[in-house]
Image (cartoon, rainbow, N blue to C red):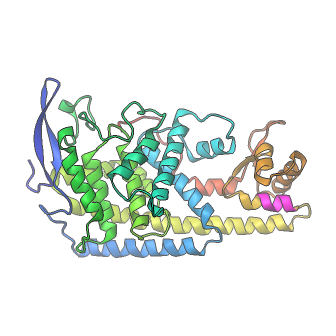
């Protein structure tokens, strides 16, 4: 047992072994309380100012839709990669550009994440939709896990068997979450804090605490990490901390994966709410500032390339229209351009040829037939941080 306890241990028997399952105390932190000192206060101000800049950037961009389109896909890829999914942003965009081709298992997991996030946001924005609740998270989880690896592990349902993190069994695990018989109580307390009027802690800090609590409870047999990170996105938008899902914290968590897991575990083992909150707020400030810079760079590129396209002597209305669609469709073919422009094959081919001659599109296949083209400079800037590091799968 620790001197600063954030929960208690419940002795359970799994198989032939007796193990200690951790049962967290309800939020907000009380024993110990979160010590909000000058360091954390400074970190919070920096994070809040960074989010303000990000929200302003979102309001100033010419097309918020494709700004969100790009960032949501980046978050989907990164959150899935943290759990071992072997799909990159380019893999996802390639599948979306070639919808006639079935996705592989890794891309399908990322597509499920996009569907799950869209579903949850749609429910929260609909006056008749589900409120922020475990029921909403269950339905979101059902969509996340549908038809993919882990689909046999009761998607959309709180687990009825013991799970664990690390190791081959609960007896040698790094962490054993609460036993199933106690989940109703801990999840009820979790849900109450979702709706609590906690005036003592800022909303941004509360979002970080709820993420830790969700990962500590680990209510599903699979997909907990992705739902827990998706929860941050939902909370920031639902609480009007951000107007849209513009913050992709999974990039920070992926970069600092070991520290991310260590900080989560330190809350359970040592009651180190301060260490986690400091790490979380640093991530918010870092990624918000990077998102602002990314948006600025992407839009500067689009503006410069628009001028190049419009100044080209062969530019047609179709070519100009196709260019404006590239931020949401940075990978194209003649077939996909026909659909996007709702035009004939010769017209689509000429539009692609114009953008290629203008140096905007790059042919990527090297073939004479069935060619594919990429808005390469745009992709290179957008894909930062989404390439695979080590090809491995981890416990989820």
Classify residue 138 as left or right of residue 370. Answer: left
Residue 19 in the magenta stretch? The answer is: no
Q: Where is residue 221 in the image (x, y as percent from the top left)?
A: 32, 37
Of residues 175 and 255, which is closer to you in this image? Answer: 175
Q: Where is residue 14 in the image (x, y as percent from the top left)?
A: 17, 29
Q: In which quarter of the image is the C terminus?
A: top left
Residue 381, quarter of picture: bottom right
* Residue 263 visible in the displayed image: no
Q: Residue at x 74, y 62 (%)?
A: 324
Of residues 246 and 287, which is closer to you in this image? Answer: 246
Residue at the front extreme of this rendering:
128
Q: In this view, does 318 lie above or below 297?
A: above
Q: Which residue is drawn at 80% across and 66% down?
A: 308
Label count reads 0
Residue 320 in the magenta stretch? The answer is: yes
Q: In this view, does 67 lie above or below 349?
A: below
* Residue 123 visible in the displayed image: yes
Classify residue 169 as left or right of residue 384. Answer: left
Classify residue 185 as left or right of residue 56. Answer: left
Residue 15, quarter of picture: top left
Q: Position of residue 72 (x, y in %)?
A: 53, 56
Q: In this view, does 63 lie above or below 123?
A: below
Q: Residue at x 71, y 56 (%)?
A: 326
Q: Which residue is drawn at 29% across and 44% down?
A: 219
Of residues 393 and 229, which is closer to you in this image? Answer: 229
Is most of the magenta stretch helix, strand or loop?
Answer: helix
Extent of the magenta region: 317-322
Q: Where is residue 154 in the image (x, y as percent from the top left)?
A: 36, 34
């Amino acid at each position: 047992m620790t001197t600063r306890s954030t929960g208690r241990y419940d002795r359970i028997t799994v198989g032939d072994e007796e193990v200690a399952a951790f049962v967290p105390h309800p939020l907000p932190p009380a024993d110990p309380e979160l010590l909000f000192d000058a360091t954390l206060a400074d970190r919070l101000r920096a994070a809040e100012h960074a989010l303000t800049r990000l929200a302003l950037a979102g309001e100033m961009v010419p097309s918020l839709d494709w700004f969100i389109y790009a960032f949501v896909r980046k978050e989907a890829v990164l959150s899935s990669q943290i759990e071992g999914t072997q799909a990159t942003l380019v893999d996802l965009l390639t599948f979306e550009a070639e919808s006639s081709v079935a996705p592989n298992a890794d891309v399908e997991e990322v597509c499920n994440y996009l569907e799950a996030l869209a579903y949850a946001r749609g429910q929260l924005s609909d006056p008749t939709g589900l409120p922020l609740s475990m029921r909403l998270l269950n339905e979101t989880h059902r969509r996340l896990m549908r038809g993919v690896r882990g689909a046999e592990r009761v998607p959309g349902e709180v687990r009825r068997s013991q799970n664990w993190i690390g190791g081959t069994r609960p007896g040698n695990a790094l962490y054993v979450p609460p036993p199933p018989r106690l989940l109703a109580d801990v999840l009820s307390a979790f849900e109450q804090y979702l709706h609590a009027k906690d005036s003592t802690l800022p909303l941004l800090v509360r979002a970080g605490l709820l993420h830790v609590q969700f990962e500590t409870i680990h209510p599903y047999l699979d997909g907990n990490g992705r739902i827990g990170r998706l929860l941050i996105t939902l909370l920031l938008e639902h609480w009007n901390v951000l107007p849209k899902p513009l913050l992709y914290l999974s990039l920070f968590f992926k970069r600092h994966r070991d520290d991310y897991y260590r900080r989560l575990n330190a809350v359970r083992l040592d009651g180190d709410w301060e260490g986690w909150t400091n790490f979380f707020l640093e991530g918010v400030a870092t990624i918000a500032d990077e998102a602002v810079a990314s948006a600025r760079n992407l839009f500067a590129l689009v503006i410069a390339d628009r001028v190049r396209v419009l100044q080209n002597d062969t530019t047609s209305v179709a070519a100009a229209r196709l260019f404006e669609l590239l931020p949401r469709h940075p990978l194209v073919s003649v077939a996909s351009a026909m659909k996007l422009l709702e035009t004939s094959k010769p017209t689509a081919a000429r539009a692609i040829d114009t953008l290629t001659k203008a140096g905007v599109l790059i042919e990527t296949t090297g073939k004479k037939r069935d060619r594919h083209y990429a808005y390469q400079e745009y992709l290179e800037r957008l894909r930062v941080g989404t390439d695979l590091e080590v090809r491995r799968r981890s416990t989820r």
